[in-house]
């Protein structure tokens, strides 16, 4: 195996260990810890939305007009109708395919 | 250990397995598109087994983000599991050490929700039930990843069939799942603007850490509110 591919294997193993730690961590913590400081809790609580947003916003701005339109339409319809992520994916995909193959 | 409990778990997990299947296949296809081999994709599904964080992982890997940041992001996206394992502690205390190990490995969102629901109703949480529920989601997750990865390898240009739009829309769906949380709008606005600025002035992949840090620091600095944090809505599908 070439070293670069080996690095990916290590990366996946590290990700698996990190994930397992989150899944076992609460059980261990609840039997040890008394209280989490409120600011730390607020920061931890913000982590997923803050990380995930950085994967969305640049694609929206720099992904090209077709991607921007598809994301906007999927967002608006999913928010308005309270759709599942899967339905939202289908809408985004349909819009981008229509733009790419029928409009442009 | 009873057979009946096991099959009751399998039946309970079946609809969730169906709902998660497209995401398993999507992960496989996009992983290959981001430079994974088929075996890499299957390996990741079998070991990490956390859909949203797997998507984040391949996206960052495809963008050549530093490995430590990839692992940290996976950790961050999965951080909610700390709350899950703390919350179900009272129901799994009677498991043996080996059973606990396996149970926590399989602790995905629906597994948590179902265990909590069952415990609240006063129904027994046996290891057999837990395992049946977990395996009917875990095993097809791997098979679907394999199917998606094989399919992904057959595709020449992912843009022509619109694959490239799926990850951003998927992440957008995950972000929207958090909209009931405390101070969602300021955090998302600041993270979004900071990541765009980071992309523009510093470049990828630094926009990820810059944007994330901006939102997290803001959350820590804002005056504490008395509203209890809403339960996470992320990754209901896997």
Image (spheres, coloured by chain):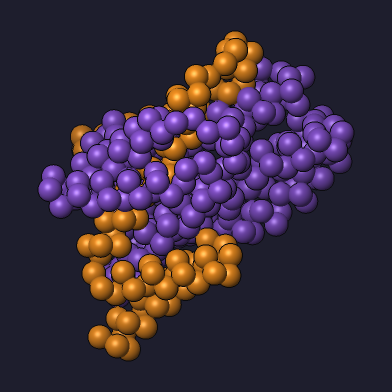
Q: Residue at x 77, y 40 (%)?
A: B117
Pinpoint residue A79: horizontal percent, then vertical percent.
Answer: 52, 65
Give left or right: position of B198 versus B162: left
Residue B64 visible from this viewpoint: no
Vertically, is A69 above or below B61? below
- Look at chain B in the picture and name its colour: purple
Residue B120 occupies which quadrant of the picture? top right
The location of residue B71, given as percent across then percent down, is: 35, 33
Q: In which quarter of the image is residue A84?
A: bottom right
Q: Which residue lies furthest to the left in this view?
A: B201
Number of numbered labels in the structure image: 0
Q: Give the position of the N terminus of chain A as an image quadrant.
A: top left
In-front residue for pair A32/A12? A32
Q: Which residue is drawn at 32% across and 45% down?
A: B191
Residue appearing at x 15%, y 52% in the figure: B200
Give the colour of chain A: orange
Q: Position of residue B49 (x, y in %)?
A: 51, 41
The front one of B79 and B222 is B222
- Relative vertical location of residue B52 with respect to residue A95 in this rendering, above or below: above
Q: In the rendered image, is residue B5 in sight?
A: yes
Give coordinates of residue B219: x percent, y percent: 41, 35
Q: Residue at x 53, y 44 (%)?
A: B181
The residue most toward the bottom is A102
In the rendered view of the protein, which quadrant contains the C terminus of chain A?
Answer: bottom left
In the figure, A70 relative to B199: above or below?
below
Q: Is residue B108 left or right of residue A51?
A: right
Q: Which of B168 and A36 is in front in this view?
A: A36
The reply, left or right, for residue B69 in relation to residue B51 is left
């Amino acid at each position: 195996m070439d070293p670069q591919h080996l690095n990916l294997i290590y990366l996946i193993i590290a990700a698996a260990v990190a994930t397992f730690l989150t899944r076992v961590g609460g059980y261990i913590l609840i039997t040890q810890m008394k209280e989490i400081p409120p600011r730390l809790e607020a920061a931890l609580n913000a982590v997923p939305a803050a990380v995930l947003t950085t994967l969305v916003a640049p694609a929206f701005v720099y992904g090209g007009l077709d991607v921007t339109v598809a994301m906007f339409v999927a967002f608006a319809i999913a928010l308005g109708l309270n759709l599942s992520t899967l339905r939202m994916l289908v809408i985004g995909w349909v819009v981008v395919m229509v733009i790419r193959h029928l409009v442009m | 250990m009873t057979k009946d409990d096991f099959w009751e778990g399998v039946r309970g997990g079946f609809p969730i397995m169906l709902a998660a299947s497209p995401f398993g296949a999507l992960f496989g296809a996009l992983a290959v598109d981001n430079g994974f081999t088929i075996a890499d994709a299957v390996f990741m599904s079998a070991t990490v087994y956390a859909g949203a964080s797997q998507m984040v992982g391949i996206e960052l890997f495809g963008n050549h983000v530093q490995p430590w940041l990839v692992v940290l992001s996976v950790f961050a996206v999965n951080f909610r599991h700390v709350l899950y394992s703390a919350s179900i502690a009272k129901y799994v205390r009677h498991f043996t050490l080996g059973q606990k190990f396996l149970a926590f490995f399989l602790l995905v969102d629906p597994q948590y929700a179902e265990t909590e629901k069952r415990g609240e109703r006063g129904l027994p949480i046996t290891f057999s039930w837990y395992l049946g529920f977990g395996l009917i989601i875990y095993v097809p997750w791997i098979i679907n990843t394999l199917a998606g990865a094989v399919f992904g390898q057959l595709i020449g240009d992912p843009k022509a069939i619109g694959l490239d739009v799926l990850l951003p829309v998927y992440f957008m769906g995950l972000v929207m799942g958090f909209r009931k949380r405390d101070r969602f709008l300021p955090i998302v606005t600041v993270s979004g603007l900071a990541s765009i600025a980071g992309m523009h002035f510093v470049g990828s992949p630094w926009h990820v850490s810059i944007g994330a840090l901006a939102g997290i620091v803001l959350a820590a600095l804002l005056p504490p509110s008395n509203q209890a944090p809403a339960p996470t809505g992320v990754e209901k599908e896997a």
